Image: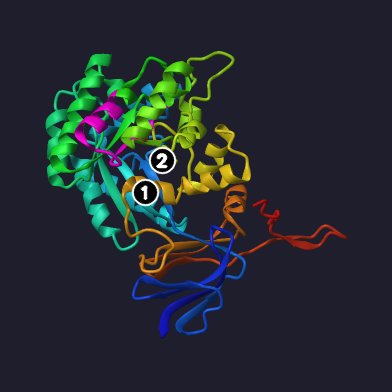
Amino acid sequence: MSFDILLKGGVLPDGSSADVAVKDGRISAIAPGIEAEAGETIVITGNLVSPPFVDPHFHMDATLSYGQPRINGSGTLLEGIGLWGELKPLLTHEAVKQRALAYCDWAASMGLLAIRTHVDICDDRLLAVEALLEVKQEISHYIDLQLVAFPQDGLYRSPTARQNTIRALDLGVDVVGGIPHFERTMADGRASVTELCQIAAQRGLMVDMHCDESDDPLSRHIEQLAFETQRLGLHGRVAGSHLTSMHSMDNYYVSKLLPLMAEAEVAAIPNPLINITLQGRHDSYPKRRGMTRVPEMLAHGIRVGFGQDCVLDPWYSLGTADMLDVAFMGLHVAQMTSPDDMRRCYEMVTTQSAGIMGLTDYGLEVGKRADLVVLDAGNPIEAIRLRATRLLVMARGRVIAQRAASPMRLNIPGREADIDRRFLVPDPR
Ligand code: FE2
């Protein structure tokens, strides 16, 4: 048998060594020492070969707009929403599209090949929806882009958000979004969860709501989201994004809440970089971290994926499309420092997030689409520690990005060496 591409000597995320053979855009073999003809053989000895990174929570309509028309002075979520409201009327179809495509170039170069982006539907022009639907088409041969209809200004608080949600879904937006904590009252927030879940159930769609993105321990819309998921039979198709209020909730209440989430198979999408910067802004000291309870959710069998949320936009002034930055911050904030926990952090920016997005053709398995990334690291933990350089990115069986590992040359007399900072510790398992 002859293959199109043969990657020789890689290390799989589980630590085993294997070659990966690709044919007709699919992974056709994974095994040590594959000896076969190949159109191209690429030696990746000792480097991690991984399924691509997945970002389950992003805002592509806002990305790369930092400074337009001004920056967020207070650093709060609410000023960010206000600032976005100033920018929205100034948006053009072409500008949204160009920024999104520029960001997707970054993403592709970082091995980030699946992104769920919320798109604000509160602009009656639905300009960002149309622009991102075009982007989705144009990048479909290398990135899976999933769109969420997101009523940024509130389903009921914004006068046209209900009809615009339906319009956006009719145009082909994939997922139903929401923002219950931003409605005028707790009751409106609860009602918005119910209505949006009903829309999703009627249309057979997934749900992903910004939910309880606040430090208010009484913001409990996740309870309603789990209830509606259960009532409408949406198990496994619903995610709550952020859930930061859970950080501040009463422990007894959480001890009841987490089993309800697990029972309804509601997934959680914390966004560590954004949660640690936006939350706790009204605190003096001690300041709350604001990230939701990740280890406790995992212990209850709740699926968790880390999202990036923002890059260079009204809410966040940094970011590089590097999901290893996200995993690195999540690991620290959640104090997930054991070897098993660090590996789970890697899974939360790859396989777990792919599961939340419902990507069925994803994974480093024979027969799956040949999407993968090769990293200058020996295993997933080292990839997080180094925020490792991407050496090769493959999409649909084609190498779409490649670079050579280039260690820094140290020229200190007596200490001349190539420095690559790799340091493999023995696997404790
Ligand atoms: Fe968000």
Q: Which residue is mark 1?
A: 355
Counting the numbered discs, the total is: 2
Rendering coords of residue 335 (x, y %)? 59, 34
In the image, is residue 234 part of the stretch drawn in magenta? Answer: yes
Q: Is residue 124 visible?
A: no
**Which residue is most to the right?**
414
Q: Which residue is mark 2?
A: 303
Asked if 15 appears above or below 227 in the picture, the reply is below
What type is the residue that disc 1 sits on?
A: Gly
Mark 2 / mark 1, whichever is N-terminal? 2
Q: Residue at x 31, y 49 (%)?
A: 358
Residue at 64 percent across and 52 percent down: it is 429
Q: Which mark is residue 267?
A: none
| Left or right position of 82 against 228 | right
Q: Are marks 2 and 1 in contact (CB under 8 Å)?
A: yes
Does residue 100 appear anywhere in the picture?
Answer: yes
The stretch of residues the image draws in magenta is: 224-243
Q: Quadrant of ligand 1?
A: top left
Any atom of ligand 1 within 8 Å of the CB at mark 2?
no
On screen, residue 316 versus residue 238, left or right, reads right
Q: Specify whether tag 1 is near ligand 1 (CB below 8 Å).
A: no
